[in-house]
Amino acid sequence: MNLSPASFPPLVPGVVLMMLCGAMTLHGAEEDGAIPRSLQEDAFDALLAGSPFTRSLGVSDSLILTGVVHVEDDVLATLLDTRTHESQVVSQQPNFKGWRLVGLAGSPDRMQTWTARVQIPGGEVVSIRYQKPPPRAGSSKSGAGGGSSSGSTSGGKLPPLSDSQLKEARLAAENYKEGFSSDGYPRQPPPEMVAKLSRLSTSQREEINREMLGHRNRGLGLDDRRKIYEGLVDRAVQRR
């Protein structure tokens, strides 16, 4: 079949006019927004950069429970922010951030099952599960001379101590009236604490000092260390 131009029927002028008007109408409607324009690739840049499936949705996403300490009638829980390596203590009283411990769950003999329920400012209660603290960059996996704290009161092993820290714990136990770097006091301990320490043996004071050095290695501040230190000393005195 010969498909020469002559074989096609001539277009009716009215049809040509309708086709031109339709094309102009569609172009005008697209400019006016009546017809959605096709999306450009850069429209998805923000979504790809901050996907809702990978975005952090809660305050507790980076927090883990690293230990629990019983101090007389109070319970202290240590929390660690795995992003900043900032550690803090929560108890039944609000801490410096206004966080308060409202409950603990799990088997006392299995720290892997522990969960702390913490109320944050605003009234929201978040659940924070126990996890082994991740190693900090540049930290050694084992302490020099094999020294480490037993961590029996904190629900897990504390960071290992160096030879110099072990020596500091021993010397501070012998010279307990002078205090030491990790007891939570800015200077010497108050007279009432010195009186309690005098009732303990040197080995008992040294054991407490080792544990407190471990808490300092975790990054606890003065107020948190002092509260734990006083609790450890009180319990040791009661056991005598």
Image (cartoon, rainbow, N blue to C red):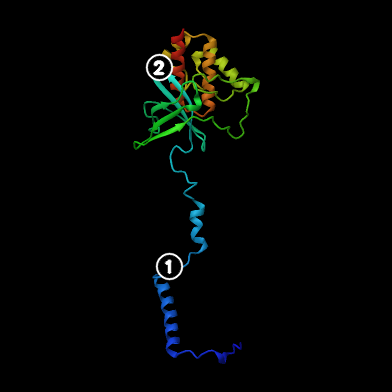
Residue depicted at 43% across the width and 14% down the height: 234
Residue 182 appears at what percent x and percent y?
A: 51, 22
Which residue is at a point 53% across and 18% down the rendered structure image? 209
Is residue 185 visible in the rendered image? The answer is no
- Provide the residue designation for mark 2: 72
Q: In this rendering, is residue 42 above or below 137? A: below
Q: Quadrant of residue 36?
A: bottom left
Residue 186, compared with residue 121, is above or below; it is: above
Instruction: Locate residue 140, reporting x and y percent.
Output: 63, 29
Residue that badge 1 annotates: 36
Which residue is nearer to you in this view: 166 or 194?
166
Describe the element under mark 2 as helix, strand or loop.
Answer: loop
Work out which quarter of the rendered image holds the N terminus and state it: bottom right
Q: Quadrant of residue 4?
A: bottom right
Q: Which residue corresponds to the image point at 38% horizontal and 18% vertical from the top-left? A: 73
Single out the residue that lies furthest toward the front: 1
Q: Nearer the viewer, residue 174 or 20?
A: 20
**Residue 81 versus residue 142 in the image, above or below:** below
User: What residue is at 40 percent from the left and 35 percent from the top?
Assistant: 126
Pointers 2 and 1 in contact (C-beta within 8 Å): no
Query: Going by the image, does 148 lie left or right of 60?
Result: right
Task: State the image coordinates of residue 49 (x, y, percent, origin top left).
Answer: 51, 52
Sequence-wise, the earlier of marks 2 and 1 is 1
Q: Amino acid at mark 1?
A: Pro
Could you tell me the amino acid type at mark 2?
Glu
In x, y percent, where is residue 128? 45, 32
Return the residue found at the far right.
145
Q: Nearer the viewer, mark 2 or mark 1?
A: 1
